[in-house]
Amino acid sequence: MASKVSVETVDLPSFFADLVRCETRLYNALNDRLRERHGIVTSQFEFLRHLRDHPGARVADLAAEFAVGIGATSKGVDRLERQGWVARMPNPSDRRSSLLELTHDGLQLVDAAEGTFTERLAELIPDALKASPLTAAAQALSELRAVLERDQIGMPTG
């Protein structure tokens, strides 16, 4: 855990602004490249990748992972389903929910898009950060995310 002295030397509102603006710009750059090459946006790629890596996930699982409301998540899954990339399967242990699985087309799409996603991040991030600051930033953000998730801070209510 960071000591209080080191936090006081950081302008936290500026840190927050930098963090959010970097996230927005990276997200937008990834949107552009994924849309251009695969016809999807970053949020769709992230849903597809999560479903590939977590077979049998539910809408509620996606919502929790991405800190998005269940209604918005369900609408996002509906769009993926209409495209033929995701299928809802009956949940044998809870008839009120469905299990989500990628279709063959969805799996092919996410596998192809993952290369584009990783390539674009590799173009954008190393140019701005040397290895040591990048490692420190990744560790700090991982620790911050873990605390926020552990304490269920910033979870949507609907």
Image (cartoon, grey):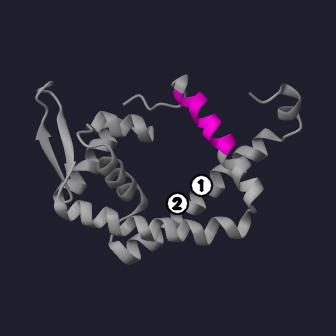
Q: Secondary structure at mark 2?
A: helix
Q: Quadrant of residue 148?
A: top right
Q: Position of residue 144 (x, y in %)?
A: 64, 35
Q: Residues within 10 Å of mark 1 (few under 14, many from 20)?
A: few
Between 15 and 5, the residue placed more toward the observer is 5
Residue type at mark 2 is Tyr
Q: CA distance from mark 1 to mark 2?
A: 6 Å
Q: Position of residue 122 (x, y in %)?
A: 58, 68
Residue at the spot x=59%, y=62% of the render? Answer: 25
State which region is magenta: 139-149
Position of residue 157 relative to residue 29, above or below, is: above
Q: Secondary structure at mark 1?
A: helix
Residue at the spot x=39%, y=71% of the render? Answer: 35
Pointer 2 residue? 27
Side (left or right) of 115 relative to 137: left
Dominant SS of magenta comes to: helix
The label shown at residue 23 is: 1
The image quadrant where one finds the N terminus is top right
Position of residue 13 relative to residue 113, above or below, is: above
Position of residue 53 relative to residue 106, above or below, is: above
Q: Position of residue 46 (x, y in %)?
A: 39, 53
The answer to whether residue 17 shows anywhere in this view is no
